[in-house]
Image (tube, rainbow, N blue to C red):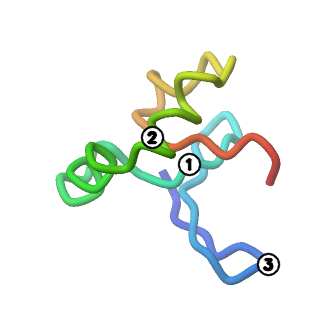
């Protein structure tokens, strides 16, 4: 995944599907941070995005 800076100054990872994620779960540091981020996990549980598991992203951003 590619790390990009967004207009609001935050960073997000962009998967091949065009979906943005807060975490790249192939990165051990991001994976550990994701495991303690309840908000990101909740976004993933509520998301209908089918690419998340294929792209190994966590904390999907639906409206960027």
Determine the secondary structure under disc 2: strand
- What residue does disc 1 label? 21
In the displayed image of the protein, which residue is found farthest to the bottom? 9
Q: How many marks?
A: 3
Q: Which residue is rendered at x = 49% and y = 44% of the image?
A: 40
Label 2 with label 3: CB-CB less than 8 Å: no
Alpha carbons under labels 1 and 2: distance apart: 6 Å
The mark that comes first in sequence, 2 or 3, is 3
- What residue does disc 2 label? 58
Query: What's the mark number on residue 10?
Result: none
- What residue does disc 3 label? 7
Alpha carbons under labels 2 and 3: distance apart: 20 Å
Figure check: 12 above or below 49: below
Figure check: 42 above or below 45: below
Alpha carbons under labels 1 and 3: distance apart: 15 Å
Give the x, y percent position of residue 9: 68, 83
In the displayed image of the protein, which residue is found farthest to the front? 38
Label 1 with label 2: CB-CB less than 8 Å: yes
Label 1 with label 3: CB-CB less than 8 Å: no
> Crowding near pointer 2: few (<14 within 10 Å), some, many (20+)?
many
Q: Which residue is rendered at x = 37% and y = 50% of the image?
A: 37
Residue 6: image quadrant is bottom right
Q: Is residue 62 left or right of residue 40?
A: right
Residue 5: image quadrant is bottom right
Q: Which residue is rendered at x = 43% and y = 52% of the image?
A: 23
> Crowding near pointer 3: few (<14 within 10 Å), some, many (20+)?
few
């Amino acid at each position: 995944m590619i790390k990009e800076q967004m207009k609001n100054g935050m960073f997000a990872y962009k998967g091949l599907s065009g979906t943005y994620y807060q975490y790249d779960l192939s990165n051990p540091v991001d994976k550990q941070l994701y495991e303690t981020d309840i908000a990101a996990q909740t976004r993933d549980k509520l998301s209908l995005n089918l690419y998340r598991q294929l792209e190994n992203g966590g904390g999907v951003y639906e409206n960027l």
